[in-house]
Image (cartoon, helix red, strand yellow):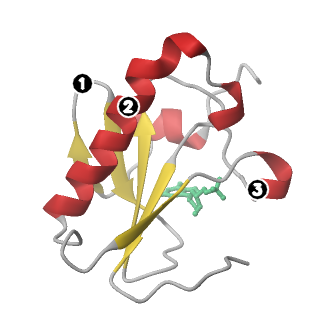
Amino acid sequence: MSDSKTIFEKIIAREIPADIVYEDEHCLAFHDIQPQAPVHVLVIPKRRIENVASLEDGDQEMAGKLLLAARNVARQLELADRGYRVVANCGNDGGQSVDHLHLHVLGGRQMKWPPG
Ligand code: DGP
């Protein structure tokens, strides 16, 4: 993992702006800058973890809090009734471009399967 701050750490530190929709002690959520659906929010842990692959057993509580934060965001943005998708891209083949664990919460349209 590189020592330099990721773009998401700069958002957590309020060094660069983001359209923040949710924050709690452990997580932050903000609108994706390149939305792939009418609602596209990123939910991130405030502590930097690179991705799902680098989670350790001791991260169990944080990982659960991240998933619950995604649920809270979906409720807050009124996606829960219609449904939505939660995605974690991991590594090169997974299409991950920012090396800070994040959940994409996508909603407001019918999702397709399989993803591209
Ligand atoms: P991924 O490809 O899974 O690593 O997703 C990274 C997402 O981060 C991608 O959908 C675009 C988004 N993103 C990148 N830079 C910024 C930024 O500066 N602000 C916001 N809000 N989103 C960003």
Q: Is residue 114 left or right of residue 24?
A: right
Residue at image coords 71%, 32%: 53
Helix, strand or loop for disc 3: helix
Residue at image coords 40%, 34%: 12
Residue under numbered circle 3: 94
User: Which comes before the other along the chain, label 3 or label 1?
Assistant: 1
Nearer-N-terminus badge (2/3):
2
Of residues 71 and 44, the one nearer the viewer is 71
> Relative to residue 75, is residue 84 drawn left or right?
right
Q: Distance between the Cα atoms at labels 2 and 1? A: 13 Å
Q: Amino acid at mark 1?
A: Glu
Say which mark, if any, is on residue 64.
2
Q: Secondary structure at mark 2?
A: helix
Can you say whether 112 is above or below 31 in the image?
below
From the Cβ of disc 3, is ligand 1 less than 8 Å away? yes
How crowded is the residue under tag 1: few (<14 C-alpha within 10 Å), some, or many (20+)? few
The kind of residue tagged 3 is Gly
If you read the primary sequence from the N terminus, does the residue marked by circle 2 or circle 1 appear first? 1
